């Protein structure tokens, strides 16, 4: 008999857990979109979105998922025949590059593999080799949600600056905004891409593109921009209708108002980052302990500093990851993420990988619960593993919370 009844935990890296408060805030009749409360709420949301990205520049909101926001960013930076330098650190950089290519922009790819962050020096070398300065922008994924590799954006900016190349720096922060430290202005990011269904704790439906004054200047000549995706009216709107290029996503705006209040006013952005840091340490500690009894279990990224704080990719060999994911869903009400991009779904190795999401509305009891049920599943499925994972995960939470 299955034991999964009870409150479930969707621990896939997006969509993430939506707080009941956010769902309740969205559960409202549609407002008049020509005057009244929704206008004030929305301009407040725009201001707070800039606070979440730590920028005083511009943000455009789109009714779209992350792929839509990718495309928005591309269309405002490039013209047909331009070049883009893309750093891939797992799966998502390749996805963004495919969109760039299909839109008629030439892609120069630096593939850092599936278990390492982007190396700023190699990006600098590629820019230095571009004597004709044809590369319009460098595209980097902050945390690749497939590999959980985290790249050092400030270091990449410094490396670009050292070459004197004028390329824009565009960053996919879909897996990190509202989870891990992100300082758009301080780190010198020109274009930052986000979506609402991860750290911002909403159902999917909104994509965000923050952009700098320099990016705005470049976009004046970007030939790929079409009326809907043009970020200029959205980012500089004086009138409400300019923000969405059509009807506003009213329910999502009510929800986003609630989640931004939770992040910025109630918990506080540094505390949100700290909570994700703590939870990440607990996951890493558990995997380290499990891996000490089995050479088949291990984290995908070896250096802690190179690991994402909102998602962890790991391996449990001999099909253990796939079996464990199934067991958890049926017996414990926990849904873990599939191993994305590590092996083809037709390859038996596909079942060796999984991801634990710890992004957004997650606290220690949810995550320690997920880890403890993973341990129970390993016992039930007789997956060889080391002992002491629960003590190690608990100690990681204790240690991180003691420090504050
Ligand atoms: C989720 C995610 C995407 C894709 O977002 P969709 O909403 O699924 O289109 C892109 N990049 C990163 C880093 C992500 O985590």
Image (cartoon, rainbow, N blue to C red):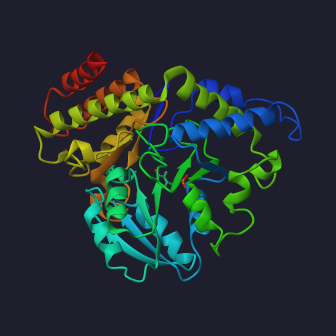
Estimate the x, y position of residue 98 in percent, counting from the top left: 48, 71
- Residue 2 visible in image: no
Estimate the x, y position of residue 121 in percent, counting from the top left: 26, 64
Query: Residue 270's image quarter?
Result: top left
Estimate the x, y position of residue 89 in percent, counting from the top left: 33, 60
Q: Is residue 59 left or right of residue 167?
A: right
Q: Is residue 365 above or below residue 301?
A: above
Q: Is residue 389 above or below residue 236?
A: above
Q: Residue at x 51, y 76 (%)?
A: 101
Name the quarter where the C terminus is drawn. top left
Estimate the x, y position of residue 300 in percent, counting from the top left: 25, 50
Q: Nearer the viewer, residue 384 or 47?
A: 47
Q: Is residue 185 left or right of residue 377?
A: right
Q: Is residue 224 left or right of residue 2?
A: right
Q: Is residue 116 above or below residue 253?
A: below
Q: Nearer the viewer, residue 286 or 110?
A: 110
Query: Residue 211's image quarter?
Result: bottom right
Name the quarter where the N terminus is drawn. top left
Q: How many marks?
A: 0
Q: Residue at x 32, y 63 (%)?
A: 162
Q: Is residue 132 above or below residue 29?
A: below
Q: Residue furthest top?
A: 402
Q: Residue at x 19, y 22 (%)?
A: 391
- Residue 279 visible in image: yes
């Amino acid at each position: 008999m299955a034991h999964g009844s009870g409150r479930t935990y969707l621990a896939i890296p997006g969509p993430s857990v939506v707080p009941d408060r956010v769902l309740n805030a969205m559960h409202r009749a549609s407002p008049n979109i020509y005057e009244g409360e929704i206008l004030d709420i929305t301009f407040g949301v725009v201001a707070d979105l800039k606070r979440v990205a730590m920028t005083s520049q511009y943000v455009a909101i789109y009714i779209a998922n992350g792929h839509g926001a990718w495309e928005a960013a591309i269309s405002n930076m490039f013209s047909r025949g331009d070049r883009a330098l893309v750093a891939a650190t797992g799966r998502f950089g390749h996805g963004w590059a495919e969109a760039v290519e299909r839109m008629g922009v030439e892609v120069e790819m630096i593939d850092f593999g599936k278990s390492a962050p982007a190396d700023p020096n190699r990006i600098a070398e590629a820019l230095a080799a571009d004597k004709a300065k044809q590369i319009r922008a460098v595209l980097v994924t902050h945390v690749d949600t497939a590999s959980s590799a985290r790249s050092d954006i400030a270091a990449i900016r410094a490396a670009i600056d050292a070459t004197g190349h004028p390329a824009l720096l565009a960053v996919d922060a879909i897996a990190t905004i509202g989870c891990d430290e992100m300082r758009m202005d301080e780190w010198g990011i020109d274009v930052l891409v986000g979506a609402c269904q991860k750290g911002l704790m909403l159902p999917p439906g909104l994509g965000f593109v923050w952009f700098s004054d320099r990016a705005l200047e470049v976009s004046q000549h970007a030939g790929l921009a079409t009326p809907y995706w043009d970020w200029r009216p959205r980012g500089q709107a004086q009138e409400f209708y300019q923000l969405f290029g059509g009807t506003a996503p009213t329910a999502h705006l009510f929800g986003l108002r609630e989640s931004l209040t939770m992040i910025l006013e109630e918990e506080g952005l540094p505390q949100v980052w700290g909570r994700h840091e703590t939870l990440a340490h607990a996951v890493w500690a558990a995997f380290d302990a499990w891996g000490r009894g089995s050479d088949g279990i291990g984290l995908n990224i070896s250096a802690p500093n190179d690991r994402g704080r909102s998602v962890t990719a790991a391996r449990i060999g001999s099909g253990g990851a796939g079996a464990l994911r199934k067991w958890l869903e049926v017996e414990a009400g926990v849904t873990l993420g599939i191993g994305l991009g590590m092996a083809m779904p037709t390859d038996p190795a596909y079942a060796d990988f999984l991801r634990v999401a710890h992004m957004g509305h997650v606290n220690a009891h949810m995550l320690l619960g997920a880890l403890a049920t993973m341990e129970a599943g390993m016992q039930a499925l007789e997956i060889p593993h080391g002992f002491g994972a629960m003590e190690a995960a608990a100690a990681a939470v204790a240690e991180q919370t003691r420090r504050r």
